[in-house]
Amino acid sequence: MTRYYSINNYLKKIFNKRVYKVSIDANLGCPNRDGKKAYGGCIYCDKNGSSSRTQEKNLSIRDQVINNILIRKTRYKAKKFICYFQSFTNTYANVDYLKKLYDEAITAHPDIVGLSISTRADSIDEEKVKLIASYRKYLPYVSIELGLQSVHDKTSILTNRHEKFTDFLKALDIINKYKLHSVAHIILGLPNETYDDMIKSADIISKLNLSGIKIHLLTALKNTILEKWYKEDKYIPMQKNKFIEIATDFIERMPKDFIIYRTSGSGYAKDIIAPTYIYDDKFQILNEINNLLIKRNSHQGKLFNIFC
């Protein structure tokens, strides 16, 4: 049994069974790539836009969903699914067009029980959040995932994100107004961030009105700025033991009701430059985080009221 409140535990409580996400690439682009905010994208973002698991971007939304569901039904005997608009910025269009995309996804298969939209905080407004919230009439689970990565604006500048922490807070206020699930993505090991910087992110995030967090390790993927930095020795990947320790420290500081949506993430194996352990040892990392909590006689929330 895990010593933190995982998304699997949460979804099993709602649906009484394991629920699987099916990734969707809507080809919506990103304002940080096309010149609206900047060019080139974030230093770690690859051609797939944060490494979506779907390789079927040329297919229709409906066909992507059906194909991915078929794979999971065959491989895992899966019964229920959440449509996950993952790649790039999935609110980066007008509301009418977004509605067309979202409608196509959730009506593609009768076993769909949820909708999750991944996006940038600066591409959220009330009209778009209201649209997403409208799907709660049909689906038990609806969420918006925001790529925060760090609370430190200096890091956002260095990583070419062109987004401020205040953008995140404004977007979160709108999401909470409509009572949607809200998820913050956090990256550990960002350039120039010290241990204290990362723990400060944890302490600040723990006080926000969020449903939960996804924890990632900074990973250099092929054809990214970060790959170039790695080859020039400007980026040194975090060692595995260090990542496990800091991810565990992070979890200890989260309130008990925060959902831990992820404790590690990776791109396609063939696209990972460094550190490769994030893919090769993925399940070992999950176990070692939980084992470290056991070794510390600790759990999610143990340090929430002490340091936060």
Image (cartoon, rainbow, N blue to C red):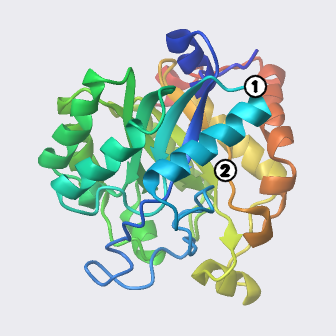
Question: Which percent across, then down, holds residue 2?
Answer: 72, 20
Where's the N terminus, which quadrant? top right
For the point 17% across and 51% down, which residue is it? 125
Residues marked 1 and 2 touching at CB (< 8 Å): no
Question: Which percent across, then down, holds residue 298?
Answer: 71, 19
Q: CA distance from mark 1 to mark 2?
A: 20 Å
Disc 2: which residue: 265
Question: Which percent across, then down, holds residue 179?
Answer: 25, 26
Instruction: Pick whichever, 210 or 206, lies toward us.
Output: 210
- Please give the label number shown on residue 107: none
Q: Is residue 14 above or below residue 100?
A: above
In the rendered picture of this protein, how many numbered marks are placed on residues?
2
Q: Secondary structure at mark 2?
A: loop
Question: Which percent across, then down, holds residue 218?
Answer: 64, 62
For the point 44% across and 64% down, which residue is it? 88
The amino acid sitting under disc 1 is Leu
Q: Quadrant of residue 103?
A: top left
Where's the C terminus, which quadrant? top left
The amino acid sitting under disc 2 is Gly
Disc 1: which residue: 293
Q: Quadrant of residue 164?
A: bottom left
Instruction: Pick whichever, 249 or 140, lies toward us.
Output: 140
For the point 51% across and 26% down, which residue is it? 111
